[in-house]
Image (cartoon, grey):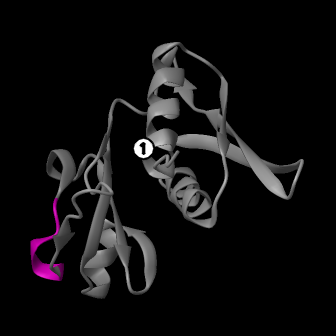
Amino acid sequence: MYLDPISDLLLRIRNATKARKEEVKVNTSKFVTNILNILKDEGYINDFKTVDIENNKKETTIFLKYKNNVSSISGLKQISKPGLRIYSEAKKLPSVLNGLGIAIISTSMGLMTDKKAKKNNVGGEVIAYIW
């Protein structure tokens, strides 16, 4: 059975924030780790920690961020899906909530936010919106 790792990550984070969980565990890949690095750098999560489990598999624990019992993540939306890829040119990159949120873009230079992609003048696949 095929499972989209990006949708799994976003769904687990969304469910954990609605349930006011302090941490959530997800399966790990390099792509998921890069997304989590962006979320940590932008201040949406506190930290994450990856541990090895059986059969060379890894599991990541994400420590969610709350302020006054309100999650720093208000919403998440996956844009590009396995059945429908969404691409954007450098000049037409999306802006989430007029710059209050971020769009995660997969470019030829790696994963980055929409602001950094505009600064570097590169386009790519729009992975998700986070606000």
Within 10 Å of disc 1 (Cα), the crowding (few <14, some 14-19, many 20+) is: some
Percent x, y of residue 60: 72, 45
Which residue bears the numbered disc 1? 7
**Residue 122 sits in which quadrant?**
bottom left
Looking at the rendered structure, the number of numbered marks drawn on it comes to 1
Q: Is residue 93 magenta?
A: yes
Percent x, y of residue 44: 49, 42
Which residue appears at 16% of the width and 61% of the height? Answer: 94
Q: Residue type at mark 1: give it.
A: Ser
Magenta stretch, main secondary structure, is helix
Looking at this view, is 84 or 9 the one in front? 84
Kindly give the residue lying farthest to the front in the view shown. 1
In this picture, residue 103 sits left or right of residue 44:
left
- Please state the extent of the stretch shown in magenta in the rendering: 90-94
Which residue appears at 35% of the width and 29% of the height? Answer: 74
Which corner quadrant holds the C terminus?
top left
Say if residue 72 shows up in the picture: no
Task: Work out whether 122 lies above or below 23.
Answer: below
Q: Is residue 95 magenta?
A: no
In this picture, residue 76 sits left or right of residue 38:
left
